[in-house]
Image: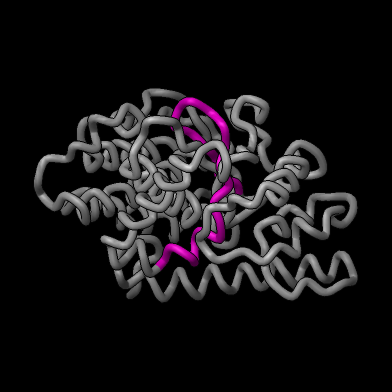
Amino acid sequence: MSNFLLGDSSINFLQGFCSDLDEKTRKKAEELDGRSYPDYTPWLCIRPILNSPIKSDELVNYKFKPGQLITDPNYLSCISEFVCGQGHDLAGGMPVHFSEWPVMEDIKVKRPDAVSAFQEGRALIRSSYFLETLYTTLIKFVVPQDRAKPSGFDSGLARGAVFRTFPSGRTGLLAGFQLAHAMGHQAAIYLQSADPLIEPSHIQKLIHYEVRNDERTAYHAIVSAAAISYMCILSESIYGSKSRPLIADDHVSGYGDDLAESLKKAVCSIRKGAPVTNAGSKVLDEMEELSETC
């Protein structure tokens, strides 16, 4: 049987699953608006909870190259206006107000180092057959944010849109792990959107998350665990069994001295904290197996 989330046997499943959900999302938006949307774009995910069609044609019609970092200042401005306005629910529930990590509209001119860091990070993703094969399935595009610390967010209301910061003075190593982290988020978000991993009545249940020693919803815990899983895969691809200098990065080190041990803690927290579905149990088994081998 194919895996759902991890390993080469999950690739075909995830590609088909995500493509199918993207198409259903596009068709639902067409049905609601009585118009044609030729292509899927992440912004269509939020349409069912809006009272009217997305106001900006530029937002939904923009032709992006799958997986790219958005650097077009006009489109970045369009995204910022949407997230701060009609699409404000997209950033709802985040621990940081959107004003503290706004869209970096001038990245192309003022932060060429950030663009280079993204490109270097993207190159690191190519070191893993698994991550590279799934990259454009899970990441439609990356939206740069302006903040001095590594951070960002992903939302089920914009599946495939990845919001991330690219702090000054940081190399492509951080960017690579940020991208792997985002891929894990997106994979879990896609699955949870159509085939719940956590029992629906417990999605918002607060549980103790041992990895960060904090309280978070069961939903956010399993999304975080998926992110750690994909970071483990990238780490193994880059370093093998050698020492992992990435831990010197303060963002990554927040997960603990050993990503595999952090993954074990994440799985344990979820198993103890909330009931999971059959699919969720299978995904946790996959994570547990990965933590024993990476």
- Examine the rendered structure and indicate whether residue 171 appears above or below residue 193: above
- Examine the rendered structure and indicate whether residue 285 appears above or below residue 223: below
Task: Tell me where residue 10 appears, x and y as whole percent.
Answer: 37, 69
**Residue visible at 54% across and 40% down?**
153
Q: Is 42 on the left-hand or right-hand side of 6?
A: right
Colour option used: one colour
Question: Is residue 273 rendered magenta in the image?
Answer: no
**Residue visible at 59% across and 49% down?**
200
Question: Is residue 141 rendered magenta in the image?
Answer: yes
- Examine the rendered structure and indicate whether residue 244 appears above or below residue 211: below
Task: Tell me where residue 166 appears, x and y as whole percent.
Answer: 46, 37
Where does the N terminus fall, quadrant-wise?
bottom left
**Residue visible at 30% across and 54% down?**
124
Q: Is residue 81 visible?
A: yes
**Residue visible at 86% across and 65% down?**
32
Task: Tell me where residue 147 appears, x and y as whole percent.
Answer: 53, 28
Q: Is residue 202 visible?
A: no
Q: Nearer the viewer, residue 154 or 106?
A: 106
Q: Residue furthest left?
A: 242
Q: Nearer the viewer, residue 88 or 120?
A: 120
Q: Is 100 on the left-hand or right-hand side of 139?
A: right
Q: Is 268 on the left-hand or right-hand side of 51?
A: left
Task: Tell me where residue 50 appears, x and y as whole percent.
Answer: 83, 50
Q: Residue furthest front?
A: 109
Bounds of the magenta segment = 134-155
